[in-house]
Amino acid sequence: MTEIRFSGFGGQGIIRCGLITGKAISLFDNKYATMTQSFGPEARGSACSSQVVVSEDRVLYPYITKPEILISMSQEAYDKYEPDLREDGILIIDTDLVKLKAPRGKIRVYSVPATRFAEELGNRVFANLVMLGFFTAISKAATPEAMKKALPGLVPKRFLDLNIKAFDQGYEHGQEALKKEKDQPKG
Amino acid sequence: MKKLKVDPKGVLTGAHYLDGDFAIAEGALAAGCRFFAGYPITPSTETAERFAERIPFVGGIFIQMEDEIASVTALIGASWAGKKAMTVTSGPGFSLMMENIGLAAMMETPIVIANVQRGGPSTGLPTLVGQQDMMQVRWGSHGDYKIIALSPDSPQECFDLTIQAFNLSETYRVPTFIMTDECVGHMHEKVVIPPADKIEVVERKWYEGPKEKYLPYKPDKDMIPFMVKAGDGYRFHTTGLTHDERGYPVINAECQDWVVRHLNDKITKNAEKIIKYEEEQTDNAEVVVVSYGITSRVAYRAVQLARKAGIKVGTLRLITVWPFPEKRIKELAKKVKAFVVPEINYGQMVLEVERAAAGKAPAILVPHCGGWVHNPEDILKAIKEAAK
Amino acid sequence: MSKDVKAQEAKNPMEDFLRMDRIPHIWCSGCGIGVVVTSFVDALRKSEIDLNKVAIVSGIGCTGRVAGYVKLDSFHSTHGRAIPFATGLKLGNPEMQVVVFSGDGDIAGIGGNHFVHAARRNMDILVICVNNFNYAMTGGQVAATSPINANLSTAPYGNFEYPFSLPYLADACGATYVARWTCLHIRRVTMSIQEAFQKKGFRFIEVIAPCVTLYARRNRLGDGLNLLKYYHDNSEIRHGADTRTLDIGYQGKMIVGKFVDREKPPFLECMNTHMKKALGDKYVPYGE
């Protein structure tokens, strides 16, 4: 079982990240994925998040408890949710939007300038797709094929190609990061 | 019951990633519901939104009414016009609906109402889970009557049980409820919608005899009277007053006795046909966990842990919550040490377990007052306690 | 006398329209509701409308009992809810002429919000409201229509609340047809109902009727005849009158007539037109 939390501020497409990931895994990767999100006024504005529980068997308890993977696209979301991340978890951040605190436990940190990449692609609304591509490469929680198959219906039709492009760019960046990590082992 | 050919226009065949609220709307469309009247309320609004978005391509009515009183009343009118009709709401709206839920029960009108439960009382927790309307659904409107209520534990079951709710409502001419909750309503999971010809939908029990002989409240052999549509020339009468077989008001104790017994007995005497539950490992169980809706999933986690610890624990998941499977509880009560009943309220269905167990085995409540689901550890603790 | 004539005489002219097995009705002698029912039946007869396609919906109260006596598809719903019930019925079977027949307490009191919204969305129903200025079924309590100074059982020292002027309310909410009569104007009421049958949208006819047993007795206004005399002497027909000028004071003058007659597509037509425009061929029209 894997517990994933996407977090950021309202308007970044954080809920969409959870939806795409959950749909990809449960419809195209043949696993179980339950997606929940925070609702109401407290879900708008400041820190917002969506959660996905992934499992080989049916998900029983629907919420995440101690996530292995945390994606943070804003400082506030990072500050709020980082303490819940497992000591051996994976932390993924937007390079330009999150300033890291001192490292904790064996948490592995990966960063991508998702928003900057998206702006280069023409619009910062694609930042969540860059992030999803990067997350897919790093976490391998879903296959990139499944993620791309999940997009229709969840992103506007006329921007499907741009969304895929954003995803691919994030994915490549993620693979490069992994390669670098492998080539230059720490310690 | 006659099977009805399902209109494929309403059926979104395939695998989808939907939340429970959306799945209810898809279930309704698949069941042939073509009339939806509702009023927005968190956390149920997504069902109305989905229906409003989909119905123009299927052919039917979505109307946002001025309140929940009007919504449920409009369903009754539409149902008498021959439409399968539904609405969705949550706590405060459910309270407003009670008046005309009574009218639907009295007029024996098939309608379906989904309640995506949140924490109460009053405005309570608009965005957070509760299972606090389980007794209200049974007893909420004044007077003596019975209803049918189902409790889905996942978006898939929201879809399946909505179809089931329509079938039961049409079969027994009774308001039927989908008692889900914020957690299931807002949770996204895979929902598989079968092809139209694989979906079982029943036809309302239409009257086919001579027009002048039609009696809207004359019970048939199965206790359920035949129905006709407004506009088909029967020129019938129906009322919320105590009435005879003709539907004419009769204000005396004798007729009241006939009506009240009928409204109750038609459900009680058909209960075994209506009731559905899921039972696991109860054969040698010392403890049986009785649960429903989202809580049953959380409880299963506790059950797994308990079994690992060597406790013989079985589960009984209520799919039909009303009528309550008292016969089964009665049987189990003779064999088990105790029942454990977790629910997201301060003790509602546990009272039914207790009543059915009739002192043969205690029912241990694991309450959660709403706002979140149980911590499985709390349920585990109760199971361990019960097994002692 | 030939047999045919006898047979004809034996048949009550109301037989095709009323549930004779439910007569006698429950209304008091001198009550005006029966008069309005007669006008309604007369309008049904004269308009040669298919009776199988007319439904009547009532709420609760004295006028609420109308649904029980008229031999149509007839629904006696809950207090104040006749209009939403009728809304569901009409939308469920759009080919029906759906008539709401209820009292002032039902329509303007407890059901006021439904009235306002059905008129706003121009729901295609005809609402006939018998206004007797009080809650009669429960014993003559003050209503949303009770004139100031009238004495009522829950206003035992006289009413001091401002009453609704129902035609003004209906007009303001967008009704396509608004008329007011007293139950002295039986032929006018019949004509108004006939006319309203020909129109679409939210149509509203208010008929002022005497409640002899409660309202009149409490206020020492005499019997049915005295009240009809009052209607005769104090009502003035003024078609097209500004609906802002239609207030009724205690035993005061009553402006009657047809005040509003406008063309406006009703709910379903709006829905179909709008959806066709928004969705094109993909839209599946409803009830056309």
Image: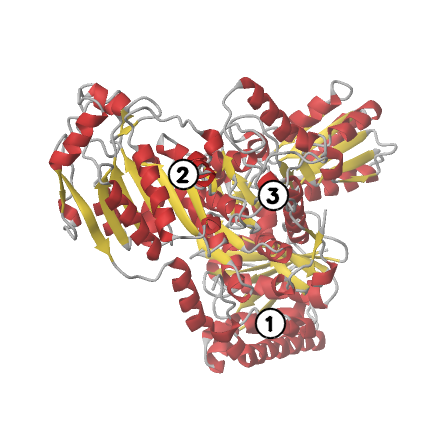
Task: Give the number of the mark in front: 3 or 1.
Answer: 3
Instruction: Tell me what residue is drawn at x 39 percent, y 52 percent.
Output: C48
Q: Mark 1 points at which residue?
A: A151
Q: Name the residue under label 2.
A: C14
Instruction: Tell me what residue is drawn at x 60 percent, y 72 percent.
Output: A151
Where A73 falls versus C143 (above or below)?
Answer: below
**Do the dots labelled 1 and 2 sit on one chain?**
no
Element type at mark 1:
loop
Chain to which the residue tagged by mark 2 belongs: C
Identify which amino acid the numbered label 1 is placed on: Leu
How many C-alpha atoms fall within 10 Å of the one at disc 2: few (<14), some, or many (≥20)? some
- Left or right of A53 in this view: C30: left
Identify which amino acid the numbered label 2 is placed on: Met
Identify which amino acid the numbered label 3 is placed on: Met
Which quadrant, please, contains the N terminus of chain A?
bottom right
Residue B252 x/y as whole percent: 52, 19
Task: Give the number of the mark in front: 1 or 2.
Answer: 2
Instruction: Tell me what residue is drawn at x 24 percent, y 24 percent.
Output: C215
Element type at mark 2:
loop
Q: Mark 3 points at which residue?
A: B227
Chain to which the residue tagged by mark 3 belongs: B
Residue C190 x/y as whole percent: 29, 45
